[in-house]
């Protein structure tokens, strides 16, 4: 464990779960959002820093076509979501990255856009990947309507009635984003521009802000269309129902390689979460206020489980396990904390025996919930300076390199990658849409253009070549003969100081479930209602039951 | 290495507008192009880093790496990389690849720093400007300001600084020859960093052509696997 990590956890470091437990796909694929999730971090910061919000432009016609600007005004800077609403025929509506038109398109602008900026963006943002944005733009995204719920809500409001709660629960959002592109994509500003801004340096804060403002746009749009349709009869959404809407997100394989390609970032996310759990487990007592809040969180989890729907067999099984585990937790809590010492740790140790992996990861999230004062500072360590770990120190000896490989990649050494089942898949970028895909190595062409995501296999290949060198040879000398191991050498150097950097599973095996990678990343975003539609793409919801900009301002003023 | 046929320069062609790319786009494009040109992934990442570093310092990194790949893509690694860290020569004849030479130098940064003021000569380097980002890494690790001298230009760089002394206009900046690196007591000026970079239409064409070699053409099987194949009008 590195010194920085040790310092963050303090005396509870022996309670950290080891990477051998945490970094397995089955567990990562059972991750739940926590209070360290990025959207929660964003909402907390906006409250702490007393952000203000307005809708400075609303030029949408009665068909729902036009533009709008939502501004988030922080203590030092303003960010503006520029939204373009379109009239999209049903036959063009597709969540796939191959789509060329959407119900709405967005850019997050750095500052307040001028009319000239809006015109420039109007010529580019609706084209998405086919357009160009510039260094004033921080993200580019688009969304499609959930047609059924969107129409239901507009029709009901136009008639002067509220939408049906059960209908809202079934879908959970009016629009779902199908891509949110961040730093540097399609001409947008790179991370270098924002990394020293406190409000933007945490992971995905810009993207989360964009999605949160998009949520406000979606409810404004249905209310606007209801007035256009129903005139004086139209009513606004009841606040209780309004808060139930999140923003959906439809995500496929494109997101899956991210966690593998960013080992430092993955480590920092995981380490923060695990340090948080260790701190809570290390508490000597369970304070009444915390146990009360915790029991509340368990009740919310039961409600969340009730409205979390999926027809995918893997997720159905997990939901069933979760429902049973929540029942077991409730029973266990009957006589908890009692008078035992370190009651949170006792609860955790009970869960490791009594609950499924799904239930354990849920309990983790619930245990963090009442402990903001103890753990929220850990969010500050979740960003990563990847440039700082790019340089390879070639002075390491081959003795050291072989030891690092044995220590951090033991999970990869026992796999026989010659076995077809162990190397059945390969990751590649499709020529058609430049998106990552997963191929069948022994059935499809293209494995000669494989992406280097097969980390276990790369580690083993490096270990086999390194075995032939003498121990005091240098890594620099080894790499001058074996440039093919350079990528692995860089990862090895990261893994040595970042214990949670590597997923300790074979991501090219025949039984890989790519949705496990997606769920882990999306849980760190703060996504709820993870709903796989196949083994490689999912729908989720963001910001359900979160405050809206107007509510947040009201709360701050009140 | 295998690659497409080099593009011949049409010297009389009118100047086409340059394309603006964000720094991450430059990094990604040059990484893919270097991979497509046959470099190992970990080396291709270094090419991406180098182009981004140069573009950030307003030097024509993507143009130069495009010119280099266009001319030299097909040479095997052992013919273009230094064989050792003493005289930085490669086995046999021919010139050094600036990325391979740069990597060899940067990988030994901590050893070089331990030996005092740095001094090195790299014989016959192609497009030596591409070595600068790697020399900078050595400057960074060793806390030394380094002078880098090539046939027709000289650069001083420190951990945060960069001076280009008598920089000739492109394409002279890519002139081949020996590269001499020495520690200097002189300080260089603070580098003024750009938010984005640009490249010529020709360079973009070359880099995209090489990038293409990293993509897999669609098959019915791959399309079927990418999504759920159901209607999104729900």
Image: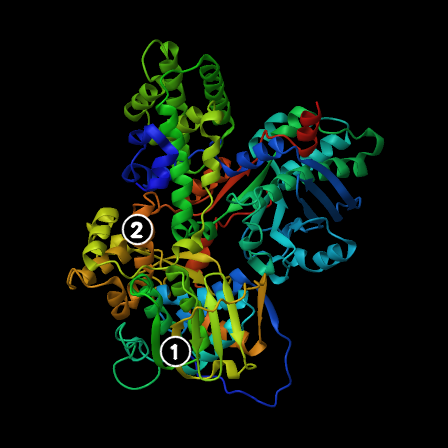
Residue named by callout 2: A510
Residue A141 vs A531, above or below: the answer is below
* Residue A158: image location, x then y, percent: 77, 32
Query: Residue at coordinates 35% horizontally, 59% vertically from top-left?
Result: A452
Residue A239 vs A516, above or below: the answer is above
Query: What distance separates the C-alpha of mark 2 from that of mark 1?
Result: 52 Å
Mark number for residue A534? none
Residue A361 vs A387, above or below: the answer is above
Side of A482 relative to A5 (left or right): left
Front-most of residues A169 and B151? B151
Query: Residue at coordinates 34% horizontally, 51% vertically from top-left?
Result: A494
To the question of a shared chain for discs 2 and 1, the answer is no
Chain containing the residue with disc 1: B
* Residue A37: image location, x then y, percent: 49, 36
Res. B175 visible in picture: yes
Side of A409 relative to A334 (left or right): left
Residue contact between numbered discs 2 and 1, judged by CB atoms under 8 Å: no
Query: Residue at coordinates 78% horizontally, 44% vertically from top-left?
Result: A58
Of the two numbered discs 2 and 1 in the rendering, the one whose residue sits closer to the viewer:
1
Front-most of residues A109 and B166? B166
Res. A29 visible in picture: no
Residue named by callout 1: B180
* Residue A60: image location, x then y, percent: 78, 45
How many other residues sit within 10 Å of disc 1, few (<14), some (14-19) or many (≥20)?
some
How many other residues sit within 10 Å of disc 2, few (<14), some (14-19) or many (≥20)?
some
């Amino acid at each position: 464990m590195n010194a920085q990590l040790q310092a963050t956890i303090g005396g509870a470091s022996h309670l950290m779960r080891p990477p051998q437990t945490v970094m397995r796909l089955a567990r990562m694929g059972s991750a739940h959002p926590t209070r360290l999730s990025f959207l929660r971090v964003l909402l907390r910061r906006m409250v702490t820093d007393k952000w203000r919000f307005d809708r400075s432009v609303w030029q949408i016609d009665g068909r729902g076509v036009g533009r709008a600007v939502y501004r988030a005004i922080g203590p030092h800077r303003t960010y503006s979501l520029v939204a373009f609403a379109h009239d999209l025929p049903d036959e063009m509506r597709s969540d796939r990255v191959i789509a060329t038109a959407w119900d709405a398109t967005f850019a997050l602008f750095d500052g307040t856009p001028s009319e000239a900026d809006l015109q420039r963006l109007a010529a580019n943002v609706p084209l998405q990947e086919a357009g160009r944005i510039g260094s004033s733009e921080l993200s580019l995204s688009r969304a499609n309507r959930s047609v059924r719920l969107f129409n239901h809500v507009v029709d009901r409001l136009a008639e002067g009635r509220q939408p049906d709660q059960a209908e809202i629960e079934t879908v959970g959002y009016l629009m779902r984003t199908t891509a949110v592109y961040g730093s540097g994509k399609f001409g947008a500003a790179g991370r270098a521009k924002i990394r020293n801004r406190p409000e933007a340096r945490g992971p995905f804060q810009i993207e989360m802000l964009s999605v949160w403002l998009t949520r406000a746009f979606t409810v404004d749009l249905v209310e606007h269309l209801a007035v256009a349709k129903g005139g004086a009869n139209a009513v606004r959404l009841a606040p209780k129902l309004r808060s139930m809407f999140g923003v959906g997100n439809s995500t496929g394989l494109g997101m899956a390689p991210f966690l593998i390609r960013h080992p430092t970032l993955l480590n920092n996310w995981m380490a923060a979460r695990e340090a948080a759990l260790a701190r809570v487990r290390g508490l000597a007592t369970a304070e009444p206020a915390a146990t009360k809040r915790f029991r509340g969180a368990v009740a919310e989890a039961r409600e969340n489980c009730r409205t979390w729907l999926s027809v995918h067999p893997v997720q159905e099984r997990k939901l069933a396990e979760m429902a049973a585990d929540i029942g077991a937790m409730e029973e266990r809590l009957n006589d908890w904390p009692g008078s035992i010492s370190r009651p949170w740790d006792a609860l955790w140790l009970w869960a490791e025996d009594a609950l499924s992996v799904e239930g354990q990861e849920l309990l983790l999230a619930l245990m963090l919930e009442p402990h903001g004062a103890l753990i929220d500072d850990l969010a500050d360590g979740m960003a990563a300076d990847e440039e700082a770990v790019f340089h390879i120190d070639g002075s390491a000896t081959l003795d050291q390199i072989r030891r690092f490989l044995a220590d951090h990649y033991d999970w990869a050494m026992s796999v026989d990658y010659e076995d077809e089942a162990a190397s059945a898949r390969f990751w590649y970028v499709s020529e058609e849409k430049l998106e990552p895909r997963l191929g069948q190595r022994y059935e499809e062409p293209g494995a000669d253009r494989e992406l280097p995501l097969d980390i276990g296999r790369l580690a083993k290949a490096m270990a086999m070549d390194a075995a032939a060198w003498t121990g005091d040879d240098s890594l620099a000398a080894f790499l001058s003969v074996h440039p093919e191991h350079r990528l692995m050498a860089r990862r090895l150097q990261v893994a040595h100081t970042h214990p949670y950097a590597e997923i300790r599973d074979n991501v090219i095996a025949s039984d890989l479930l790519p949705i496990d990678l997606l769920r882990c990343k999306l849980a760190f975003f703060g996504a709820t209602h993870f709903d796989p539609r196949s083994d490689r793409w999912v729908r989720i919801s963001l910001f359900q039951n979160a405050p809206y900009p107007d509510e947040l301002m009201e709360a701050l003023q009140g | 290495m295998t690659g497409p046929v080099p593009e011949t320069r049409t010297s009389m062609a009118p100047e086409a507008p340059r394309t603006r790319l964000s720094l991450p786009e430059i990094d990604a494009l040059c990484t893919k192009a270097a991979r497509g040109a046959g470099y190992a992934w970990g080396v291709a990442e270094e090419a991406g880093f180098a182009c981004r570093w140069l573009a950030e310092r307003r030097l024509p990194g993507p143009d130069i790496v495009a010119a280099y790949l266009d001319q030299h893509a097909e040479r095997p690694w052992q013919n273009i990389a230094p064989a050792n860290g003493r005289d930085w020569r490669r086995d046999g004849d021919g010139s050094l690849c600036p990325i391979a030479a740069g990597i060899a130098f940067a990988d030994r940064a901590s050893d070089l720093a331990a030996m005092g003021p740095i001094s090195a000569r790299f014989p016959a380097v192609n497009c030596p400007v591409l070595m600068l980002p790697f020399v900078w890494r050595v400057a960074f690790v060793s806390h030394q300001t380094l002078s880098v001298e090539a046939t027709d230009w000289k650069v001083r760089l420190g951990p945060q600084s960069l001076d280009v002394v008598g920089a000739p206009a492109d394409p002279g900046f890519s002139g081949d020859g020996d590269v001499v690196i020495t520690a200097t007591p002189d300080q260089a000026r603070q580098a003024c960093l750009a938010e984005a970079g640009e490249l010529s239409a020709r360079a973009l064409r070359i880099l995209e052509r090489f990038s293409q070699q990293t993509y897999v053409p669609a098959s019915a099987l791959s399309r079927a696997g990418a999504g759920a194949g159901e209607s999104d009008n729900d």
